[in-house]
Structure formats: C-alpha cells, structure tokens
Amino acid sequence: MHSPEPAPGHLDLYAKRKAVFPKAVDGRFRRFKWLVMVVTLAIYYGTPWLRWDRGPYAPDQAVLLDLGNRRFFMFGIEIWPHEFYFVAGLLIMAGIGLFLVTSAVGRAWCGYSCPQTVWTDLFQHVDRFIDGDRNAQLRLEAAPWGPQKIFKRGLKWTIYLVISFWTGGAWIMYFADAPTLTREFWAGDAAPVAYATVAVLTATTFLLGGFMREQVCVYMCPWPRIQTAMLDEKSLIVTYKDWRGEPRGSVKKAEKNPGAVGDCVDCNQCVNVCPTGYDIRNGPDIQCITCALCIDACDSVMQQIGRPRGLIDYATLEDCEIERAGGQPKPIMKALFHTRTLVYLGVWGAIGLALLFALGVRTQIDVSVQKDRNPPFMLMSDGEIRNAYTVKLRNMQTRPRLMQVTLEGLPGGVMWTDEMAREKAAREIRVTVAPDQVEVMRVYVVAPSDTTPQSFSFALKATDAEGGGDTSEARFDAPEE
C-alpha cells in the first residue's frame, strides 16, 4: 500500500539523507586540499609528542594544557590564570581571522581547514581505498547484503573506528604528559575522565565523519549562515559563469550548431566531485563549502574538449558582471585585498601586535595582597597597631628565585610572617619562591600607636642578576582620631 501524496503546501520537517559518493579528481585545488589535510592532521596528532626543554622544574611537553596546575604551555610561552587575556586575545584573533578569510575568499575555511571537512575528506579516501571510486561505491550501495558487502562494510567501519579512536586519544594528550598518559591509559590507570573523553570523541568522530558528513555542514553547523551574511559582491567565491555555459549542450551539438550552445556540456562532473553533492550551476548556496573541486573537474573537461578553463572559477560577483558585459575583470590580488578585507587585516594585526607587546613587557614575578577584614586591626599591649595580610608571591620562571619584600610608606611600620619570630620584624623580608609556583605568606604589619589610617605598598624585587619587580598597594587600618 502506497503512502498518500502530501497535500499542496505541505512542508516536510525532515528529509531522509541521500548518501553522497564524491568522485576522485585531480587538480590544483585537490592537491591543495591534500596538503592542508596532511598538515592539519600531522599538527593535531603529532603536537602532543613534541618536546620543549624548560629546565628541571617544568614539563617538557611543547604544548600542554595543565589544568591541574592551571597553566598553559606553548613552546617558550607559559600562560598563568591571571593572564587569561592572552587566551581571550587569541580567540578574538581566531574569530577575526575567520572574518578575514571569509571576506577575501568566501567559505575557504569550510572547504579546507574545518575539522569536519578534514576528517570527512580522510574518511572519503578510506571509502575509495576499500570500495573503489564513485561508480563502484554506487554499485556496492545498491547491491544486496552478501559476504563481499558485509566484509567491505566491516573493514571500512573498522578503519573509521580506529581513526576515530586515535582522534579522541590524541585530544587527551594535550592535557597531560603524552608518553606518561599513554602508558597509564593502556594500563588502566588513567583518570576516568580520560576514558570518558576518548569514548565521546570516538563516537562523535565516527558518526559525524563517517555517516553524517555533509549534513553537519548544511544543517547542523551555524557558520554557513553567518558566513553568508558576511559575503558581498567583492568577495571571491566559487562561481559558475552561466553567460558562458548556457545553454548547455553536447560537443556534437556544438559542432553542428556553432554559437548556439554554451561551453557547459552537462557532464555533471562538477556535481559528481562535490563532497556535499551540490550543483554549483544553480548559483551560490550554503551547500557549497568552497572546496573548489568542481573547478578542477570542470577545468579538466574544458581541456579535453579544447575550450578555455574557468567556466567554473573563483570570481567576485562584481567581476562576473564586468566579464558578462565583455569587460576585463580585476587582477586576483586586487580582488583579494578590497577595503573590508584590509580593515579585518588591520584589526587582526593590531590585536596580534598588542599581544606580542604585552608578552614582551610582562614581568616574571608579581605580588598580590589581600587584607584581613575581620578584625580590620588589633591594638597590641604596648599600644602598637597590627594589621594582617595574605601576601602571594608569584614566580613565573622555571627556577627558584630569591625575592625581597619591602614596605613602602607607613612610617615606623615593620612586618613579620608566621615563619619568623616577632622580634625579627623588619621593613623587609626575603623569601625563596619555588619555580613556577605561588608562595602564600601570612604577613603581620605593626605600626606606632599614633599611626593614622593610610595607604602603603608591598614592593617586590628579585635579588638575582635578572632582577625584576612588582608593587601592590594595601590599606593600613587604625583607630580614627
């Protein structure tokens, strides 16, 4: 019994996925995608294993998100929690970088560097390795389940699972020493969160890269909608030049009717190679991820039939109108660097320079002070007034450093700590702070009985040859006159 036809005006809320089997293609953009895929995967899988000598007191992993000690190590740079503005700045730069790329060359991020694109591309190469190219995959898809199909599906999905597992495993290596965590993981001694993280990332990579692919790009990801709003007539996008290609016709038809048909021979190669199965001849759409494989396919066909390349090409809508009217489009570099792109580039560069400047002038030691509020002060038996403070000395280097803390202001005031006798109170004290650590001290400051409420400072200075210092202002409370 057939299901009834939908009534006029009926809108399906869900459309069943139609599997896409992209055809292999060779060309400059395909080779560029190979390069990007190899480089990005090598960076992702290999970075946790890179070593960086920071001395005997710090981890030697080049890139490490040490959540336990609240540190972020990236080669020679170490970011502390109070320096999170560096991370925020990098995230802002990444966002503006995406705006810059979109303004210049459309959805190139989606087409080449997005993790969903990279892993989908990798899985599609697994498909071709096991099942063959597009036509062989279509035949296998249509074939009934039998020993050969079961074997090929099982082998392919096993490879998917291995890739997905290694993807999840590589991710956790960024949060602990990679060799140590690997041994603990396989010995069953790793933290439960490590196993849970690997399981979740394995499942998501397996499903999104292996089975949902273009659905993630077209339906699940919000970025295509955002990017579409950022494009204008000056943005380079993958474009079908319909004035040149239409009306479509075969080579034989063109030979019989010179000038009556366009350059497009309706071979559908541009559709067959598209990883989302989109027909670029229908115009710009969010289904087009700007991977430019259709350009490679079309250029190859044009070469075979003796017609000029560029029927499908990177072009701006503005230049397309000029070319349609018979004019000469702008050079590619001029199209790339239009006003909006230059504005994005300027903002992106300014933020980068500001971060580099802040990184260059930051101190490797600092002091922070928190005053006790209850009680604000105490009157001693000899009439002196005492205030208590929690003083934190931060050593951001990978070696112990001897530091001197001095009172600035507060005439007659002296201080001591829990580790000192009251009789040894002085205007300055010396403390050795361990490498890459924060030394927390309980400091008591006393001043003469006639001292009034006032501000003063704790001045910190490193006593070694490298030097450096910091100051933190504090408040000394006393009875009001």
Image (cartoon, grey):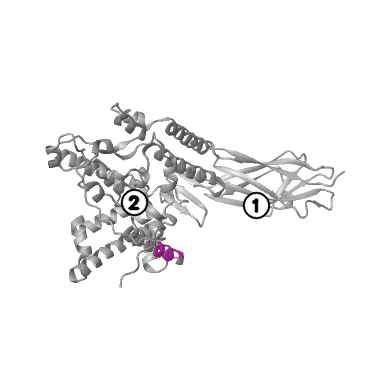
Compared to 196, does 66 lie above or below?
above
Instruction: Give coordinates of residue 8: x percent, y percent.
Output: 39, 59
Residue at 36 percent across and 38 percent down: it is 105
Q: Residues within 10 Å of mark 1 (few under 14, many from 20)?
A: some
Residue 434 in view (yes/no) = no
User: Type of residue at label 2?
Assistant: Thr
Between residue 24 and residue 467, name the one nearer to us: 24
Question: Is residue 381 left or right of 165 when viewed as pictured?
Answer: right
Residue 383 is left or right of residue 275, and the answer is right
The chief SS type of the magenta part is: helix
Which kind of residue does numbered mark 1 sit on? Met
Q: Nearer the viewer, residue 124 or 189?
A: 124
- Name the quarter where the C terminus is drawn: top right
**Residue 358, percent across and down?**
53, 37
- Secondary element at tag 1: strand
Residue 453, picture quadrant: top right
Which of these two is toward me, 148 or 187? 148
Q: Which residue is mark 2?
A: 117
Q: CA distance from mark 2 to mark 1?
A: 52 Å
Count numbered badges in the picture.
Answer: 2
The residue furthest front is 8
Dot 1 corresponds to which residue? 441
**Is 199 within the magenta?**
yes
Q: Nearer the viewer, residue 394 or 174?
A: 174
Q: Measured from the top left, where is residue 285 in percent x and y?
A: 36, 46
Which range is magenta? Answer: 193-201
- Residue 27 is covered by the magenta coloring: no
Q: Tag 2's secondary structure?
A: helix
Quadrant that contains the N terminus: bottom left
Can you see residue 106? yes
| Residue reaching furthest to the right | 481
